[in-house]
Image (tube, rainbow, N blue to C red):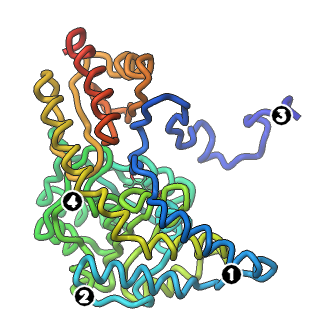
Amino acid sequence: MDAVTLADLPLREDLRGRTPYGAPQLEVPVRLNTNENPYPPPAELVADVTEAVREVAAGLHRYPDRDAVALRQDLAAYLAGSTGVALTERNLWAANGSNEVLQQILQAFGGPGRTALGFEPSYSMHPIIAAGTRTDWVPAPRRADFSLDTEAAARIVTEAAPDVVFLTSPNNPTGGSIPLPELEKVLRAAPGIVVVDEAYAEFSSRPSAVTLLERYPAKLIVSRTMSKAFAFAGGRLGYLAAAPAVVDALQLVRLPYHLSLLTQAAARAAVRHAEATLASVAKLAAERDRVAEALAGFGFTPVPSDANFILFGRFAHARAVWQSYLDAGVLIRDVGIEGHLRVTVGTPEENDTFLEVSKDVASTEV
Ligand code: PMP
């Protein structure tokens, strides 16, 4: 079977030559490369998830609730509580990670003959999901300091008139977030859907774009995930908030029973423990600021971050520096931005190790 290669398969022409998303998954002592929460879930959460899964396991011969109503109610309550916006399950949709949520959005609102626009550098999966759904991708620029010039962005959106605009706030991999009045300039200019990807919202002190839903119900979708602040990356649960009509649209493309009985039960248990899990957010934000300050002290230039990671530079040879970190047992991320690398904020001990290596790197590189 190995004699058959990708080139021998009748693959879609537009997928030939592409590379899959691939953050390395390596077993090293300090893993700071995929923006996970470094704190494992609290013991009570683990016990509650286990019990919830045990309870539903007896019903595994039946399909799960196709519309995941109870989970969507729980997520609506969490999001309403944290944003102050009245939301019900009719405003909420959930899937296996926000990547699947984003894919469903492009299946419904993008697709052949349609375009999606994003301001780069940003989350690398946005153009990959666009390619998978055959949505034409329109890359648009950020400022040299990676912030978003929203006046220019609104002009670009007016001219390009994309079917879908992605705004990532805080932006991955650069870390900055967009103040809501700025974000509204782009929202007003957009003729179609605007997805505000808030995967890292809990780490930011800015208000959420959820507060704008009432004003832009036919345009705005806010996507969220339990993978970061909720420390639930392994559970695979992403969600969005939007007008109920948007949820109706997504039901046209979602696969039936896409959220397993086990996922729904585990995610509901995790949401019940939101307060305990989210207690790590303040610790991580403080550590982020400590790490950024130390990096600056070593002569690096950290990009101001509102998330749980820091993009920093400049390096003459970022790839070689990435390897030096790895050789020292610290896995960080080369996100393909010239002269820069990204580090996820870890536990204080992990950050100390990262900073020790950084000090050595600084003496040879900067
Ligand atoms: N959006 C952004 C900006 C991200 O950084 C990520 C994860 N790296 C995701 C969405 C997807 O996360 P998940 O599928 O785990 O919810």
Q: Quadrant of ligand 1?
A: bottom left
In the image: residue 300, left or right of residue 88: left
**Label 2: which residue?**
214
Please tell me which of labels 1 and 4 falls first in the chain.
1
Tell me where residue 287 appears, x and y as whole percent: 22, 44
Please tell me which of labels 2 and 4 falls first in the chain.
4
**Label 3: which residue?**
4
* Position above or below: 51 against 218: above
Give the CA separation, mark 3 to mark 1.
Answer: 38 Å
Is the shortest distance between ligand 1 and the CB of mark 3 under 8 Å? no
Using the image as rendered, state which of residue 69 and residue 276 is in the foreground. Answer: 276
Give the CA separation, mark 2 to mark 3.
Answer: 53 Å
Q: What is the crowding at mark 2: few (fewer than 14 residues within 10 Å), some, or many (at least 20)?
A: few
Question: Residue drawn 27% across and 21% down?
Answer: 356
Tell me where residue 67 appears, x and y as whole percent: 58, 85
| Residue type indicated by callout 2 | Glu
Front tag of 2 and 3: 2
Q: What is the crowding at mark 1: few (fewer than 14 residues within 10 Å), some, or many (at least 20)?
A: many
Question: Residue drawn 44% across and 90% down?
Answer: 90
Is the shortest distance between ligand 1 and the CB of mark 1 under 8 Å? no
Which numbered tag is attached to residue 64?
1
| Residue type indicated by callout 3 | Val
Q: Secondary structure at mark 1?
A: loop
| Residue type indicated by callout 1 | Pro
